[in-house]
Image: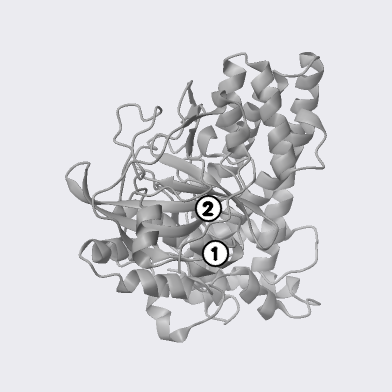
Amino acid sequence: MTLTIPFDNTYAALPGQFYSKLPPQAVKAPRLAAFNEDLARIMGITPGEAGEMAEVFGGNQVPEGADPLAQLYSGHQFGTYNPQLGDGRAILLGETVGTDGKRRDIQLKGSGRTPYSRNGDGRAWLGPVLREYVVSEAMHSLGIPTTRALAAVETGETVWREGGLPGAVLTRVAASHLRVGTFQVFAARGDKASLQRLTEYAIARHYPDADGPMGLLSAVRDAQSELIAAWMAVGFIHGVMNTDNFSISGETIDYGPCAFMDVYHPHTVFSSIDRGRRYAYANQPTIAVWNLAQLATALIQQMDDPQAGVEEATEIVHAMPTLTEAAWLRRFRAKLGITTERDGDQELITALLGRMAENQSDFTNTFRALAGGSARDQFTDPAAFDTWEQDWQARLEGEPDPVTVVRAANPAFIPRNHRIEEMIAGAVAGDYALFHRLSAVLATPYEDQPEHSDLQHPPLPEEVVQATFCGT
């Protein structure tokens, strides 16, 4: 059987200032390490032999119908504007329209140098590729909008960082790779025509009911408000919420120094370079508003009456905290088994979170245990839970089936950082057993799966991963 990808490309039809067209760089000895058959089926892709797929998804062979390019964008990185970033190690092969009617990008990540590489080698090593594969697919199974992983290929080459590491290429699938930074680069250049063209394209692709630049801004705000609340509800920390990592489609994108919390604390960070805790867990809603404001600033540049645009955009951006809080409350009520709204719910939720932070409680296991009556075991001082539980039980009166609601809102399994590191170490040594096991278990994260209960355990003190790193 021959690999067949039904390309239907639209971004490549935009003017040349949006990208640089070039093929991926070939690798020495591509080997298919993983292929997502379920995703391929949805995308209408017919798989081929492993060797052929390794050649295509490793970047050695450009498939028929592809129109490879590296996208241009800029962005704020830790609050500082960089006027030109772009795909420095990624090539967009093209797009498909799946059997579900959804358009998706197919991008090779780690596919070699581009005009935007800025002294980088354009490559990725195996660890971050497998991390993104497992974590993005886990996020999808959790029901949270995200890019997905179609394939992982070992390159047979050494990538040099602090030492030599095995190279790899990830095939990433996204609703699109349009970012806030895609708009920023043209606004900063004063290229009004390109900014208008990009806005029209984004609306047509993602929000066809949106009316003009401010309609697009409102749609992105709404999507991102829901996304951030979803992150918070599973204890996810993106790690680098730069504007070039802030998706117009409202998907989670660019899994670099990301992680799911073990012990709950609102100020938790994992990025090794986030010394100021800009992107700490609790700061994510605020940073999302900041990023939206940067999108607003860019979009306004194309309007005939910029001052009127400023006033409308300000109103749109200022509404985001309220929308995010409402989405947060809805999700955290469900985490407590609550389906109705009452005054005092926010105080009940924050009271539990405060006690969890004081008592070294595991975020995922504590909420999951609310369904089984063992949540107090997650507290160093169980009495701290007992006094809160009285208020919680009183609030549950009249709720029809809180146990079912709790179980549906709280996963039993997340991709824990220490297990991801263990998986990477195994794969580097040639053993993919834990990769396949994690992938299978995390595909149904809300099921108990007692035979895999060891994957629910938080890390021992010597297993704690203190920081994660970008996949460059």
- Mark 1 or 2, nearer chain start: 1
Q: Quadrant of the N terminus?
A: bottom left
Residue 129 in percent (x, y) is at 37, 54
Query: Relative to 15, does residue 104 appear above or below in the rendering?
Result: below
Q: Please report contact status of discs 1 and 2: CB closer than 8 Å, yes or no.
A: yes
- Identity of the residue drawn at 49% across and 45% down: 93
Q: Which residue is mark 1?
A: 39
Query: Relative to 72, does residue 110 appear above or below in the rendering?
Result: below
Task: Indicate left or right for 266 with 276 as reference.
Answer: right
- Taking depth in this image into account, of 98 and 308 the one nearest to the observer is 98
Q: Which residue is most to the bottom?
A: 451
Q: Which residue is mark 2?
A: 173
The reply to whether residue 24 is in sight is yes
- Identity of the residue drawn at 40% across and 53% down: 56
Query: Circle 2 sits in a helix, a strand or a loop, which is it?
Result: strand
Query: Relative to 22, does residue 56 appear above or below in the rendering?
Result: below
Task: Indicate left or right for 78 with 141 as reference.
Answer: left
- Identity of the residue drawn at 70% across and 77% down: 402
- Residue type (three-letter) at the residue carrying disc 1: Leu
Residue 104 in percent (x, y) is at 60, 51
**Disc 1 residue crowd, few under 14, some 14–19, many 20+, Cα 10 Å:** some
Residue 444 image label: none
Task: Indicate left or right for 134 with 307 as reference.
Answer: left
Residue 138 in percent (x, y) is at 50, 64
**Disc 2 residue crowd, few under 14, some 14–19, many 20+, Cα 10 Å:** many
- Taking depth in this image into account, of 405 and 265 the one nearest to the observer is 405
Between the C-alphas of marks 1 and 2, the distance is 9 Å
Q: Please identify the quarter of the rendering in which residue 328 is found.
A: bottom right
- Residue type (three-letter) at the residue carrying disc 2: Val
- Taking depth in this image into account, of 95 and 203 the one nearest to the observer is 95
